[in-house]
Image (cartoon, rainbow, N blue to C red):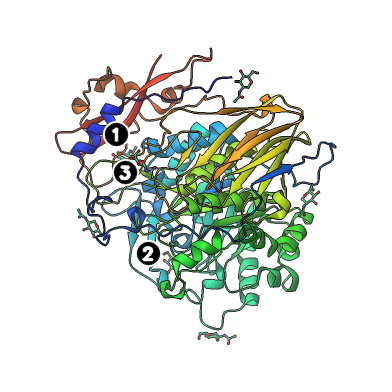
Amino acid sequence: MAARRILPVLAASLCAFAEVSVYPYPRPSATPGAAYVGWQAYDPTTLDDPPLPNPMPPLDFQIQLDTSGNPAASQDQLGSFLGISIEMSLAEAVIGPNSSWLRPQFLNLMSTLKERGGPPVLRLGGNTQEKAELVDSIDGGGSLAKFAIGPTGFTNTPTLQFTVDIIKAVRAASDILGIKWFMGVPMNQTTPPRLEIVEQGESIMGEYLWGWQLGNEPDLYVSHNYRPANYTEEDYMAEYRTILDAVTADPLIQTKNNYGGPGVCCIWQLGDLINNQNYLGQFGSQLNSLIIEHYPLDNCDPSAHDPQQVLNSYMNHPFAVSFGQQYAAIAETSNAAGKPVILLETNTASCNGFRGLSDSFAASLWATDLALQLASVNFTHMMLHLGGQAAYYNPFVPPPHNATAPFMWTVGPTMYAILLVAEALGQTGHARVADLGANAGNQYTPGYVIYEDNQPARVVLLNYMSDTSGASDYTAHISTSASEVKVRYLIAPQVSMKTNITFAGQSFGGYFESDGLLRGDHTTETVNCSGGSCAIQVPAPGIALVFLTDSAYQPDDDMATYASTHITAMHNTAVVDPSALQTGNGMNGALRAQMKLASTSANKKNGAGRRVGEVAAGILLASGAFILGFRMLVV
Ligand SMILES: *[C@@H]1O[C@H](CO)[C@@H](O)[C@H](O)[C@H]1NC(C)=O
Ligand SMILES: *[C@@H]1O[C@H](CO)[C@@H](O)[C@H](O)[C@H]1NC(C)=O
Ligand SMILES: *[C@@H]1O[C@H](CO)[C@@H](O)[C@H](O)[C@H]1NC(C)=O
Ligand SMILES: *[C@@H]1O[C@H](CO)[C@@H](O)[C@H](O)[C@H]1NC(C)=O
Ligand SMILES: *[C@@H]1O[C@H](CO)[C@@H](O)[C@H](O)[C@H]1NC(C)=O
Ligand SMILES: *[C@@H]1O[C@H](CO)[C@@H](O)[C@H](O)[C@H]1NC(C)=O
Ligand SMILES: *[C@@H]1O[C@H](CO)[C@@H](O)[C@H](O)[C@H]1NC(C)=O
């Protein structure tokens, strides 16, 4: 089967965006050598690649796959295993202000995931959920506002106000793409408990609510000034009981048993709560999941770690394995109690990540390995945090609130890991994952096998080494009776690179270049096999996703794209005048005004295997505001 093309676009119209854009921050490539000043999310500063291992691992080795039909592997996993944790204060910027103004970039990004791994499972919460207040209306209008009032602690977390329009926007995105959500419930006080989001959100979210996360990182309540210094695990247990009892007694809440916790991150030991406080036993009848929030390293004190050393220490398989092993016993206990184990918030490092690590190809490698590792030890979800402009680690991020134009987003390296993992686990819901211990367990060349129907279906091979000479590429000979296999690569020229990352030949582009769609030829390589084995090349650095059977080969390039009337406009921009919506691309304002969300979700391919052509277009309004990325079908 030849590689198929996907999503041709008119490059010229995209370039036109860039020419008229006005960046409120230095262009990333401005002056080589000059120190970057600006938001962390767009910092082009790179680290060095990690040194090559000494001794080098064997670069040519066999991989034997278990075809007994009874493999030692994980429980069934969903293609949505690796998801995104969206900080609650970013709901409006990322998802949209209300159900009729969804952000097309977000929909497009989620559509690329759905196409591969089925409907995404996401989380909306974080530090800002604790003081978030659901209000009837916000002074000055809109559906979300932040205020620097109340205790903030060292994270400077603002107090958040939002209206029910935000929840309706979340629901509208789910109506289109089937996204399911974990949503945050505040626990900043117990008397009275603040259950408004549940009371009003439950019926709005309906079937798309996966669960409520009651309280976020309670082991940091003291340092965030939410509780006095003498606050203990016992106090927390008592408060949790008080609130769950209030849920039970609340006539406005229908479902009483879809709560997740404890969401401890940093100071308390999860094992203490489970084993000594009997967390699962105490609350089991109302819990639907065990929530963990943990980052491999704490970067809240930036002087504590040298990012270069950290990068070097992350670039190997034992780093991912040890993260999973610290929870192995807990995961087993929790699964035995029927409570799925969810890593609801993580990323490369807490407090916004490390410059040069969290925003480079290193993060793609780290996230892919960790996700497959946690899948292999029976976690059910892992969510990469999206923290906004001040974070290095965003899977993607809309432009700053005061950006004038254009409204193109920035997609980070971890998004490529989310894509690859979605495709590796696929859409059956029965993918079972095992760590291959590849290459005699060598730490730089790990691999995973994904079983479908208990037979090997896909293999993921990682190469952590960074060597532009090609001398550290390796060849894995995979045992299979197939005569040929398909391979897609997630690659970048170097581990330390921040752009030039492609998956199956496609890219979301660099800083401020994305409307959420992949660009470029979709390339899939076919590898001939002989003598019961296929030789798969894995570049240094890179990840190969190998499809062993035709039925394992996804996606079929069938996806919906979004935009039209859900125009992206940041809250500082002028009201859009429909008469200004004139464009040379065959669609006028009146026509676009007629297009509703429902009809654009019909922007599916035409069913007969023909490719759907699309045009991208942008409009510069007289006011200087920009509307981008509406796409229309040109069959
Ligand atoms: C945007 O806001 C940031 C900080 O909030 C500020 O540093 C920057 O100068 C602002 N840019 C413009 C164009 O106002
Ligand atoms: C994961 O679940 C599967 C299926 O229940 C089980 O066979 C396997 O032993 C579990 N793995 C771990 C590490 O607990
Ligand atoms: C949705 O939000 C947009 C942008 O803030 C606003 O112009 C529009 O009036 C809102 N629609 C509704 C129904 O509130
Ligand atoms: C909890 O948060 C709400 C909303 O921000 C605030 O009104 C309330 O005072 C807070 N409670 C405590 C005990 O700080
Ligand atoms: C904990 O500290 C608070 C505030 O300092 C105080 O009111 C409370 O009595 C203390 N509780 C215990 C059990 O000592
Ligand atoms: C990265 O991509 C840019 C633009 O496509 C290209 O000019 C540049 O040569 C690439 N860099 C490397 C190291 O491949
Ligand atoms: C694979 O096999 C096909 C048919 O036997 C042949 O046409 C093709 O050239 C081979 N590809 C490679 C890379 O050897």
Mark closer to the observer (2, 1) = 1
Q: Quadrant of residue 179?
A: top right
Q: Earlier in the sequence, mark 3 or mark 2?
A: 2
Quadrant containing ligand 7? top right
Dot 3 and dot 1 residues touching (CB under 8 Å): no
Q: Earlier in the sequence, mark 3 or mark 1?
A: 3
Question: What type is the residue that disc 2 sits on?
Answer: Pro
Q: Name the residue under label 2.
A: 158
Q: Which SS class for mark 1?
A: strand
Q: Does the residue labelled 3 lie within 8 Å of ligand 1?
A: no
Q: Is residue 184 depicted above or below 81 in this figure?
A: below
| Residue 12 in sight in this render | yes
Mark closer to the observer (3, 2) = 3
Dot 2 and dot 1 residues touching (CB under 8 Å): no
Q: Name the residue under label 3.
A: 512
Q: Which SS class for mark 3?
A: loop
Q: Nearer the viewer, residue 163 or 36?
A: 36
